[in-house]
Amino acid sequence: MFQKILIANRGEIALRIICACKDLGIKTVAVYSEADRNSLHVRFADEAVCIGPAKSARSYLDIPSVMSAAEITNVNAIHPGYGFLSENADFAEVCAAHGVKFIGPSPNVTRMMGLKQKARAAMKEAGVPTLPGSIDVLHSAEEALEIANEIGYPVILKAAAGGGGRGMRVVHSAEELPTQLLQAQTEAGAAFSVPDIYVEKYIPNPRHIEFQLLADEHGDVEVLFERECSIQRRHQKLIEEAPSPVVTPELRAEMCERLKVAFKKIGYTNAGTVEFLMDPEGNLFFIEVNARIQVEHPVTEAITGVDLVKSQILIAAGARLSDFLIRPIQLNGHAIECRINAEHPETFAPSPGRITGLNLPGGIGVRVDTAVYTDGVIPPYYDSLVAKLICHGATREEAIDRSLRALDMFVVEGIYTSIPLQKRILADEDFRAARIDTNYIARKMPPKATAAKG
């Protein structure tokens, strides 16, 4: 087992990793920017090293600075969390060159999964259903037109090396495709330094469903069921739940088996998430692999009892899944996660600032993952996540009711948060009836004139 792990991240995920390390008796090293000097992950780690100024490009994304901190503290491994360097294959290679274990997939697999058209090809070859579209990246507008005419409009253009809605365009006709392709390539090049674009059939109003997996370094793979992530705005998830209310036991079993075969074939290791779109007929189509832990991993932990972060560390240390997983994995109840963001609940404008008052909810079935505290500051340099509220119940209805009760008791003063919006969603009859899709918020929650803080 590792003696000391460096956490190449910040905020709630850094604290989450510290907790897992403490459970395993492993010492921790926090790295932090000058803006995070007073953060809780700095306080609760065994050691802490400042790696640069506030801008992430000169701190959390600066590989030489992170590796220098790893060397001077003599760590055995680095956990990247999510975001920042978590899916950077070059960083994983640098770790290996320095004799430090990267807690995640191998660099080759991470690189393949990061290039979405290659991930699509690998999944298709393994029998996982994929959307009709280009086999490789597009080389010309003429090629794009030919493929689009074959699969039928509407189609969607996607950046091969990125996500988050950047480099993405929905195209409804041949006339607009060349212009949209050029715009997508320009945006992808600016965002990811790679202008490559591929095209897929577009599914209007789909559900977003993802499957969680763990794979050890001995060829064993376990799939820990699915999550429903359809409540989004601007391609960013706002509420997640597990299991999906529309995935049948038969479809769940089929997809779990297909994914086990696929990920054994590609030699995947550690934790990963496979994202799908579901059409109105209930068919699933692969879209991408996230080769890291996900923000929404706690809902899977709630319904399975499996500590995913601890599992990541054990796998990286060479353990077999059979050493720590009790099989078969049982699905227990229902869980919902609300991402509490520092943003206006109606305009979604960021709301950084000092937290002047704070009350975190509790009670049975309620978990809060956060790194905020009274008088703490939400800086403007990073994402706007304040906390994750995870509520577990015996049924989906109980999980919803428990989430509403917890949101009523969740007080954040001094900044705007997404709590009022999430309360509206959870109380809405369509959400409660699971009549949701990725356009739910745009369709159901039009802007209001004012919004309350809290």
Image (cartoon, helix red, strand yellow):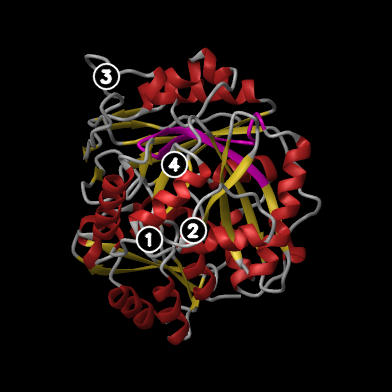
The answer to which of marks 4 and 3 sits earlier in the sequence is: 4
What's the distance in space between the residues labelled 2 and 3, CA to CA?
Answer: 33 Å
The residue singled out by tag 1 in the image is: 9
What's the distance in space between the residues labelled 4 and 3, CA to CA?
Answer: 39 Å
Amino acid type of the residue that numbered disc 2 sits on in the rendered structure: Ile
Tag 4–tag 3 contact (CB < 8 Å): no
What's the distance in space between the residues labelled 4 and 1, CA to CA?
Answer: 36 Å
The residue range painted magenta reads: 225-246
Nearer the camera: disc 4 or disc 3: 4
Is residue 237 magenta-colored? yes
Crowding around mark 1 (Cα neighbors within 10 Å: few <14, some 14 to 19, many 20+) is many
Can residue 390 be seen at all in this image of the molecule? no
- Identify the main secondary structure in magenta: strand
The answer to which of marks 2 and 3 sits earlier in the sequence is: 2
Nearer the camera: disc 2 or disc 3: 3
Nearer the camera: disc 2 or disc 4: 4
What's the distance in space between the residues labelled 2 and 4, CA to CA?
Answer: 40 Å
Nearer the camera: disc 4 or disc 1: 4
Name the mark on residue 59. Answer: none
Tag 2–tag 1 contact (CB < 8 Å): yes
